[in-house]
Amino acid sequence: MRYLTTKGRIISGDSPLEVLVALKNTSFIDVKFGLTDYLELLRLRVDMNYDIKLEDLGHVQAPEDLENIGFLLRLE
């Protein structure tokens, strides 16, 4: 799976978990967080920036949810 982020970076992974880790690692601020903490921060950012509340941003569903709101664009 390959995605284009809102910052113009291309991330990829063989699973949703790998995609989220790649997304987390695109920011030097977020790289220090564990995945659970990062997902909570990401959920809050989406709420603040897009005014969309994601109740559960689990690692399996997250890339699809982020794609649906325009946070990620699937490339393949």
Image (spheres, rainbow, N blue to C red):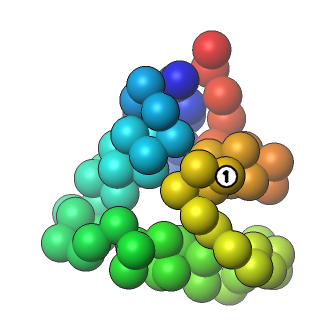
Considering the numbered disc 1 on the image, is that residue within a helix, a strand or a loop?
Answer: loop
In the image, residue 31 lies at what x, y percent? 22, 64
Depth order, front residue of 56/2: 56
Q: Which residue is mark 1?
A: 61
Residue type at numbered disc 1: Gln
In the image, residue 34 lies at what x, y percent? 27, 72
- Report the residue at 43% width, 25% height from top: 14
- Report the residue at 51% width, 80% height from top: 40
Is residue 70 visible to us here? no
Horizontal placement of 17 versus 49: left or right? left
Horizontal placement of 27 versus 62: left or right? left
Is residue 11 visible to us here? yes
Judge whether 9 appears above or below 71 on screen.
Answer: above
Depth order, front residue of 38/29: 38
Can you say which quadrant of the picture contains the C terminus?
A: top right
Judge whether 55 appears above or below 14 on screen.
Answer: below
